[in-house]
Amino acid sequence: MTTRIRLEDIAHARSGDKGDGSNVGIIAYTDAGYHLLQKELTAECVKHHFSSICKGSVERFNVPNLRAINFILHDSLGGGGSESVKTDAQGKTHGQALLRMELDLPSDVVLTDLQP
């Protein structure tokens, strides 16, 4: 038995852009949350979550000393701030969008261990 949780239940985010790519950092509140993110938050599931806007690859980088995972979403801004016809071709909103992603919480993990 698993429970569905949103990333915002166990982490916060920072994001930005550089050219046509966006950078999204997900920072776990606790060590237990970071371990869950390491197992469940893959580049593939982030790519799927952003499938309507991310036309390129997604790279994942672990930052264990910050309990964080950083993702680079290539070709996700329609050319970047000055080239895109998108209303908001900046990556600053992608962190908030990723926090809405849902994960399965394994039955042996207690949600309160993942929160501050």
Image (cartoon, grey):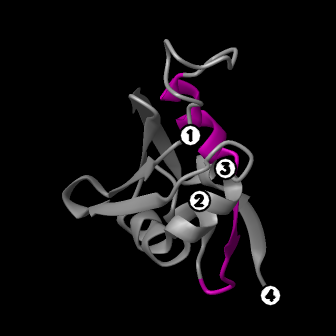
- Tell which of 30 and 98 is nearer to you: 98
Residue located beneath label 4 in the image: 1
Q: Measuring from the top left, give residue 94's x and y in whole percent.
A: 57, 36
- Contact check, label 1 and label 2, Cβ < 8 Å: no
State whether residue 11 is above or below residue 82: below
Residue located beneath label 1 in the image: 76
State whether residue 103 is above or below residue 94: below
Residue pictured at 53% horizontal, 17% vertical: 83
Q: Amino acid at mark 4?
A: Met
Closer to the eye: label 3 or 4: 3
Closer to the eye: label 1 or 4: 1
Q: Amino acid at mark 1?
A: Ser
- The Cα atoms of the two marked residues, 1 and 2, are separated by 12 Å
Q: Is residue 107 left or right of residue 1?
A: left
Q: Amino acid at mark 2?
A: Val
Q: Residues within 10 Å of mark 4 (few under 14, many from 20)?
A: few
Residue located beneath label 3 in the image: 50
Magenta stretch bounds: 90-108
- The Cα atoms of the two marked residues, 1 and 3, are separated by 8 Å
In what element is the residue under mark 4?
loop
Q: Is residue 62 magenta?
A: no
Q: Is residue 112 visible?
A: yes
In what element is the residue under mark 2?
helix
- Contact check, label 3 and label 4, Cβ < 8 Å: no
- Contact check, label 2 and label 3, Cβ < 8 Å: yes
- The Cα atoms of the two marked residues, 2 and 3, are separated by 6 Å
